[in-house]
Image (cartoon, coloured by chain):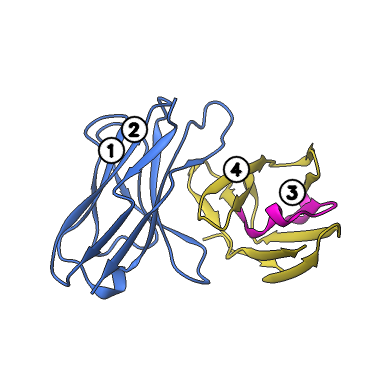
Amino acid sequence: GIQVEQSPPDLILQEGANSTLRCNFSDSVNNLQWFHQNPWGQLINLFYIPSGTKQNGRLSATTVATERYSLLYISSSQTTDSGVYFCAVEQSGGSYIPTFGRGTSLIVHP
Amino acid sequence: NAGVTQTPKFRVLKTGQSMTLLCAQDMNHEYMYWYRQDPGMGLRLIHYSVGEGTTAKGEVPDGYNVSRLKKQNFLLGLESAAPSQTSVYFCASTDWTSGNEQFFGPGTRLTVL
């Protein structure tokens, strides 16, 4: 099956800093999602982004499908951004089964 | 619109006991999924369903059974719980014909002693 690798595995920031999280995948994908799991465990869908760039407030994401990677940008980080960020991809072929990476754990200090 | 709900939120079992986790969604989604999350492992798919009356195995199906008798409900059963099944269980649903976003429930924390 498709392999999904996220980097870095851990990230510690001071409030106000910017960061870039990366998701590499090993095969063609139909879709790609970024999720945030908050410290209480809730998983929230941030972006559905099989290709191109999207922005939502301080967060933006870019997927370059031909080069098999996606980036999640967090600008002016806040303590509420803390948690784990997951990338999930659905391999081309119409399986509708997302495969998750192991996540990037982000801690933002005040 | 409650989205995806899971019951119970917490449960402690003894080895060999059985239980059923319930997932319900009110978004009329066709696809539903059960995942388990263990430290450092991300989310691993246990079973999934592409519509009422259908189920299929995911990455880690052993020791679990599922049923989708109604479109809005997806049940995960543990017939004989083992300590290795201690985990946090998440249910998700999606409608691939519009949006393709997955919506997750709040999770069930299960401990097997």
Which sits earlier in the primary sequence, circle 4 or circle 3? 4
Q: Which chain carries label 3?
A: A
Q: Name the residue under label 1.
A: B54
- Using residue B28 as the reference point, say whether residue A57 is left or right of it: right
Residue A82 belongs to the span the image colors magenta: yes
Magenta-highlighted residues:
A64-87
Q: Which residue is drawn at 77% across and 50% down?
A: A66
The chain assigned the colour blue in the figure is: B
Tell me if residue B104 comes above or below residue A39 in the rendering: above
How crowded pointer 3 is (Cα within 10 Å; few <14, some 14-19, many 20+) is rated as many
Q: Residue at x 65, y 51 (%)?
A: A28
Tell me if residue A78 comes above or below residue A51 in the rendering: below
Amino acid under label 4?
A: Asn
Amino acid under label 2?
A: Gly
Cα separation, mark 2 vs mark 4, equals: 22 Å
**Callout 3 and callout 1 share a chain:** no
Mark 2 in CB contact with mark 1 (< 8 angstroms): yes
Tell me if residue A86 comes above or below residue B32 in the rendering: below
Closer to the camera: disc 2 or disc 4?
4
Where residue A42 appears, as percent x and y from the top left, is: 51, 50
Amino acid under label 1?
A: Thr
Q: Mark 3 points at which residue?
A: A65
- Name the disc covering residue B51, or none: 2
Task: From the viewer's side, name the closer residue of A33 and A19.
Answer: A19
How crowded pointer 2 is (Cα within 10 Å; few <14, some 14-19, many 20+) is rated as some
Dividing the image into 4 quarters, which one contains the C terminus of chain B?
Answer: bottom left
